[in-house]
Image: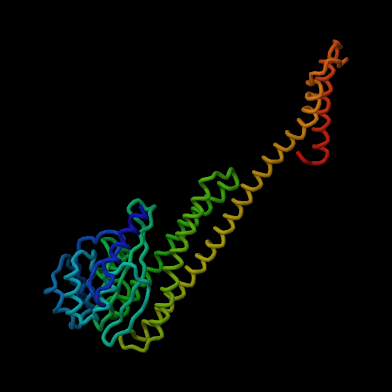
């Protein structure tokens, strides 16, 4: 399944080769989801929320004193993204990056807006699968534009706070809204890491009981997941740090204080990621050592068996020779004597191996 997605993504990238910069083509691992636009416009006293809004409904709110949050889910309607970008004065390269789902988390400063890209992680419907999604944010003077690959995100609690006027959200500006979104994106890395921690503990138990060959595949799968988490959260830390350093009127000093808290959370996530990286490396070493020890035990057992049979094979070989004059062959006690001797030699060798600690 992953190879099919990667192949589809490469195919879309290939179709864009040679096209001029700013060409608007959706590039993602899967086909673009249908585009829906939701609106959340609020002041300290009022709030307006609508789903399925049109471009004509969005434009009057661009320069309004209220805070406007336009959320785009799905990138199927490329023309709508272009029209909205032109209406809000977005650079063609920004619109191109919005449609390209393989962006690295980053921050770009422009005269009238700030463009951010982060990786959003949240649980699927069965609460087992972790969903990775690119989130593009455009912060303007009184508006925030967010672009998601598909329906579903981590902002349900944030929307509830806006509706019910909880906390500071409706008292502060668009920069605080962006902070709140970044805070939720980073905080949702912790549940994903908790799931990784549970799987690591499960692998540890399986290794201590009876390491099976499929454990190796589980370890490598977790290593890839942790590596992806590391690649996602490390640039977010740089994005938040750069946003705090930038001297721009779009981010107030008060919001900078909250951004420092998000930065601290990214450090915590990185520490957990590094811990799990080290633990998985140790588990891999333990698995390899266990397999090697098991192989050594098997080889030792086989060697002991082979060693015991060496003198027995010699005796059988001697008495199995077809010489005519062998006095033992005519002796009635020769056969039981040979069997007793072979049994005695085997027992004596087993006793010697045990005294030496070889078995």
Indicate the quadrant where residue 315 lies. Answer: top right
Whole-percent x and y of residue 46? 19, 75
The reply, left or right, for residue 171 in relation to residue 305 is left
Q: Residue at x 23, y 74 (%)?
A: 23
Q: Position of residue 132 (x, y in %)?
A: 36, 62
- Residue 15 position by quadrant: bottom left
Q: Find the residue positioned furthest to the right.
A: 327
* Residue at left offset 59%, top offset 44%: 209
Name the colour scheme. rainbow
Q: Is residue 283 above or below residue 273?
A: above
- Let me know if residue 346 appears in the view: no
Residue furthest to the left in view is 56
Q: Position of residue 149 (x, y in %)?
A: 28, 64
Q: Quadrant of the C terminus?
A: top right
Answer with left or right where residue 233 lies relative to residue 43. Answer: right
Q: Nearer the viewer, residue 252 or 25?
A: 25
Q: Position of residue 208 (x, y in %)?
A: 60, 47
Q: In this orientation, does residue 122 appear?
A: yes
Q: Is residue 178 left or right of residue 62?
A: right
For the point 81% across and 15% down, the residue is 335
């Amino acid at each position: 399944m992953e190879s099919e997605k990667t192949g589809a993504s490469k195919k879309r990238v290939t179709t864009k080769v040679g096209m001029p910069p700013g060409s608007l083509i959706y590039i993602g691992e899967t086909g673009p989801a249908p585009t829906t636009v939701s609106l959340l416009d609020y002041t300290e006293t009022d709030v307006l929320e609508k789903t399925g809004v049109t471009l004509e409904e969005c434009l009057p709110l661009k320069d309004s004193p209220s805070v406007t949050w336009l959320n785009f889910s799905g990138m199927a309607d490329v023309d709508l993204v272009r029209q909205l970008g032109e209406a809000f004065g977005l650079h063609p390269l920004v619109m191109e990056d919005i449609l390209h789902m393989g962006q690295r988390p980053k921050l770009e400063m422009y005269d009238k807006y700030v463009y951010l890209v982060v990786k959003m992680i949240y649980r699927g419907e069965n609460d087992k699968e972790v969903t990775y999604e690119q989130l593009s944010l455009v912060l303007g003077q009184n508006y925030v534009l967010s672009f998601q690959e598909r329906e579903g995100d981590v902002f349900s609690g944030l929307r509830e706070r806006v509706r019910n006027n909880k906390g500071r959200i409706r008292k502060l500006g668009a920069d605080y809204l962006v902070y709140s979104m970044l805070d939720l994106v980073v905080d949702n890395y912790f549940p994903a890491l908790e799931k990784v921690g549970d799987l690591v503990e499960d692998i540890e138990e399986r290794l201590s009981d009876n390491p099976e060959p499929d454990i190796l595949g589980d370890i490598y799968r977790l290593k890839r997941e942790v590596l992806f988490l590391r690649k996602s959260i490390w640039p977010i830390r740089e994005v938040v740090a750069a946003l705090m350093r930038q001297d721009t009127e779009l981010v107030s000093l008060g919001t900078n204080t909250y951004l420092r808290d998000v930065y601290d959370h990214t450090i915590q996530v990185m520490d957990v990621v590094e811990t799990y990286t080290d633990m998985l490396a140790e588990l891999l070493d333990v698995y390899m050592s266990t397999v090697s020890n098991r192989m050594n035990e098997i080889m030792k057992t086989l060697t002991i068996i082979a060693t015991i049979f060496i003198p027995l094979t010699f005796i059988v070989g001697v008495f199995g020779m077809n010489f005519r004059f062998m006095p033992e062959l005519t002796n009635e006690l020769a056969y039981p004597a040979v069997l007793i001797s072979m049994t005695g030699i085997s027992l004596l060798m087993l006793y010697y191996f045990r005294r030496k600690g070889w078995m």
